[in-house]
Image (cartoon, rainbow, N blue to C red):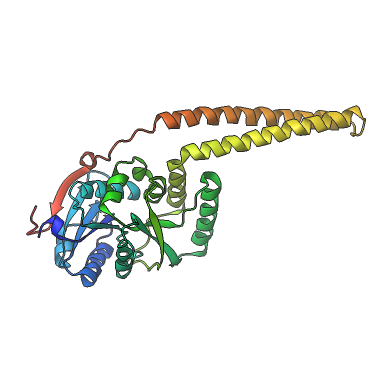
Amino acid sequence: MSFTEHSTVIVTPVFEDVEASGRLFKELESVFGRDVFVVAVDDGSVKQPVTPDAITDAGLEGTVLRLRRNVGHQRAIAIGLAWTADKLADNQRVVVMDSDGEDLPQTIPALLDALSPGDIDVVVAQRKSRVETIWFKTFYVFYKAQFEFLTGRKISFGNFMALTPGAVRRLVSMQETNVHVAAAVLASKLRTKLLPLDRGPRYAGQSKMNFVGLALHGFRALMVFAEDVLVRVGILCMVIAGLSVLGAIVAVILKIFDNSSPGWFSIASGILFVLFLQTGTLTLMTLMLTGVVRSGNVVTAIDYADFVERELPTRGLVA
């Protein structure tokens, strides 16, 4: 079968995780049969590189995109989407999912069914339950609150999503997709639907995402909306600067009417003056940075050829 004869294309990043990805391929076959094409993006694995045989052994067809180096989870997904967009037919649909088992193949039909009405471009999985530690759940709640405060947007989903061909082509034209896929979906203005789904446990091994990596992943989402973040920080600084001026005026009035204790006016005015200078300087810096971010917003398609070392199709696949 050729690529376009499969109704669904699965894009999944794999990094040193042959056992888990092999089990994923088998479960995909049990759900879809042969009516699915797998694009496995090997993110620079050295010890356990995924091979086309793992896809073939599961009874599926697909391609392994072996990257020249490790580029990270989000960029690996973006590269897989860019490769897929070049070959995608208008009647196909694309699913992005992790290869470790936490995104359950059995829930993919529900995602795809939600695309059927024709007025939805992307259906994203919103987690109903998580098999996670307490510290992860606490950090995730803090991350969502911080994201909403700094960007004015809510984010409650990850990479597990189903997309129409038009949505895929739109995302691969955005550099933000390289940085954070879920945030790029928000920034794309695509018609998005949230679908509550359970999250499963890992098939095998331990997660390679440590606390530092998790924090970096959260900051990357903020980077997608850097302009909005800078504007909000600037406004906050202006408010604080205004309050410091108001506080200085109150301090002067109290001094004039001799209602302040000895030395209080000097300390209060000094602190307020320093606060005003700092917030004023930070406001000017955020305004300049906002201009830099705005001038750098150039629409450039993701060039997967710069990262893919080899394309390894399964045996018998028709180009």
275 lies left or right of 250: left
Q: Against 287, is 10 above or below?
A: below
Q: Nearer the viewer, residue 14 or 257?
A: 257
Q: Nearer the viewer, residue 162 or 75?
A: 162
282 lies left or right of 170: right
User: Residue at coordinates 53% horizontally, 57% vertically from top-left?
Assistant: 141
Observer able to see residue 43: no
Q: How many marks?
A: 0
User: Residue at coordinates 24% horizontally, 67% vertically from top-left?
Assistant: 28
Q: Nearer the viewer, residue 125 or 272?
A: 125
263 lies left or right of 210: right
Report which quarter residue 57 is drawn in: bottom left
Q: Position of residue 128 (x, y in %)?
A: 45, 67
Q: Which residue is farthest right?
A: 258
Observer able to see residue 281: yes
Q: Position of residue 167 (x, y in %)?
A: 30, 50
User: Residue at coordinates 80% horizontally, 30% vertically from top-left?
Assistant: 249
Q: Quadrant of the N terminus?
A: bottom left
Q: Against 242, is 58 above or below?
A: below
